Image (cartoon, rainbow, N blue to C red):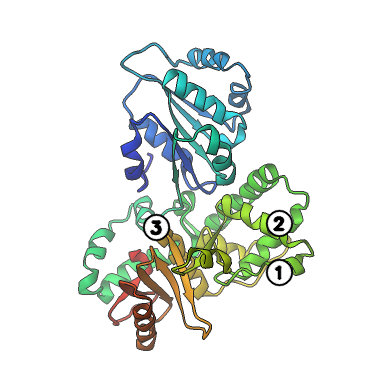
């Protein structure tokens, strides 16, 4: 049974629009399942679903005469003559067909076809679609499961919505203990949908390794077309060790013995295929934000956890297990990005705020917060004129203005 994802509520208002709906995101985050869910929730007998990872389906779009593609669509059961039922086309993994934007534009403009498209490489999608589909698309990014979605996939009876609603009154230790076991699983093994359904640790680790192998082979090797695949592999290892720290292009360039421009290119690719996330520094000056070095995080805490210490098959060596605090910080980040723009703040003195959401709310991440942590956060937040501030704690705390990772 297909599960409804939270992003569906954002997509729903555009189901009847004339523009194409494009869903992007990291490989194996559930884009195909979401596309099928949308398909099932549209009452129509005039629709077509094609998986473009199938080479046979790719060939349909290799015609230079797009009218021949129309004939193919009709042979596959689509009708262009029903006045009361416009044709709906669902295409999965569109980055595998390079001329697809032109095809989509042609059928939108000439036949009013409604397209629902998925792809796992935002760099290619945004660049390929920027000109040919200007004004003809809405793009949505599907991330890994939030903790609330994770509970849904686990078919848990925990009502997280009620817990969040009662946050102002405080979370009791008994409620914390009820949720913390599942949250610890989510923290350690992440939010890829298929991982949440695995029953034991060995299966989860094996599946995470498989997801990474799939990403490396299908995104890095096939789409990236890099001359030095071992360099980007080693770069990933170095970035794992630098999780939660500022990106230093010069040091990475020296360690890997490649140019700064090559490092920049590889970093851009890793971010645009959703494997890493760069968080920019907070500033009221946009130019200042762009100039200063961002912090590096990974798409998923489970991926970070496993490949910081357990993976040896593809990357050739293992690294030291990531610190629990950084793992928790990465998990908080991957949930906060669902709510808007995320920045960090750091003074020359070393005082900092881990995350600032939408330039309004400060979040400091701590395994076990202290009253001193809260006072420092309050002071910096006041100096910056931020409306709200919270400590995000991993462990149970009786301090005020404390939230927990499972409440994001």
Which residue is found at the position 76% from the left and 56% from the top?
230
Task: Give the left or right position of residue 204, taking residue 55 as reference.
Answer: left
Check disc 1 and report its element: helix, strand or loop.
helix
Q: Quadrant of the C terminus?
A: bottom left
Say above or below: 81 vs 222: above
Q: Is residue 64 visible?
A: yes
Mark 3 and mark 2: span between their CA atoms? 29 Å
Q: Quadrant of the N terminus?
A: top left
* In-front residue for pair 373/163: 373
Which of the two labelled residues, at mark 2 and mark 1, occupies the earlier sequence position? 2
Q: Quadrant of residue 10?
A: top left
Mark 3 touches mark 2? (CB < 8 Å) = no
Check disc 3 and report its element: helix, strand or loop.
loop
Mark 2 touches mark 1? (CB < 8 Å) = no
* In-front residue for pair 67/275: 67
Q: Position of residue 223 (x, y in %)?
A: 66, 43
Count of residue discs: 3
Mark 3 and mark 1: span between their CA atoms? 30 Å
The numbered dot on residue 340 is 3
Q: Is residue 187 visible?
A: no
Q: Position of residue 258 (x, y in %)?
A: 78, 61
Q: Position of residue 178 (x, y in %)?
A: 30, 68
Task: Name the residue that disc number 1 marks.
Answer: 250
Which residue is found at the position 35% from the left and 71% from the top?
404
């Amino acid at each position: 049974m297909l599960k409804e994802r939270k992003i569906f509520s954002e997509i729903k208002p555009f189901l009847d629009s004339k523009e194409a709906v494009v869903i992007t995101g990291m490989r194996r985050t559930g884009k195909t399942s979401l596309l099928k869910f949308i398909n099932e929730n549209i009452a129509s007998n005039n629709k077509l679903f094609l998986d473009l990872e199938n080479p046979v389906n790719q060939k349909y779009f290799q015609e230079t005469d797009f009218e021949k593609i129309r004939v193919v669509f009709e042979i596959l059961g689509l009708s262009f003559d029903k006045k009361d039922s416009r044709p709906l086309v669902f295409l999965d993994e569109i980055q595998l067909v390079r001329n697809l934007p032109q095809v989509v534009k042609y059928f939108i403009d000439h036949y009013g076809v409604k397209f629902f498209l998925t792809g796992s490489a935002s760099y290619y999608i945004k660049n390929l679609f920027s000109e040919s589909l200007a004004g003809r698309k809405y793009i949505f990014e599907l991330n890994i499961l939030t903790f609330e979605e994770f509970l849904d996939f686990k078919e848990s009876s925990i009502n997280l919505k009620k817990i969040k609603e009662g946050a102002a009154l405080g979370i009791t230790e008994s409620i914390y203990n009820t949720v913390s076991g599942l949250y610890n699983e989510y923290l350690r093994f992440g939010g890829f949908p298929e991982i949440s359904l695995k029953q034991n640790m060995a299966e989860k680790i094996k599946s995470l390794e498989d997801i990474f192998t799939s990403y490396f082979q299908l995104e890095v090797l096939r789409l990236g077309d890099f001359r030095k695949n071992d360099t980007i592999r080693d770069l990933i290892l170095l970035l794992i060790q630098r999780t939660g720290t500022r990106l230093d292009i010069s040091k990475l360039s020296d360690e890997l013995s490649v140019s700064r421009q090559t490092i920049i290119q590889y970093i851009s690719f890793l971010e645009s295929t959703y494997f890493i996330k760069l968080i920019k520094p907070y500033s009221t000056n946009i130019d200042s934000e762009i100039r200063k070095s961002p912090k590096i995080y990974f798409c998923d805490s489970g991926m970070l956890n496993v490949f910081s210490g357990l993976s040896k098959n593809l990357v050739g060596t293992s690294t030291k297990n990531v610190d629990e605090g950084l793992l928790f910080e990465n998990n908080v980040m991957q949930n906060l990005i669902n709510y808007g723009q995320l920045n960090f703040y750091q003074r020359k003195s070393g005082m900092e705020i881990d995350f600032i959401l939408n330039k309004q709310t400060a979040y400091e991440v701590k395994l076990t917060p202290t009253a001193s942590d809260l006072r420092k956060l309050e002071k910096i937040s006041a100096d910056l004129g931020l409306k709200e501030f919270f400590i995000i704690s991993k462990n149970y705390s009786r301090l005020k203005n404390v939230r927990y990772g499972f409440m994001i």
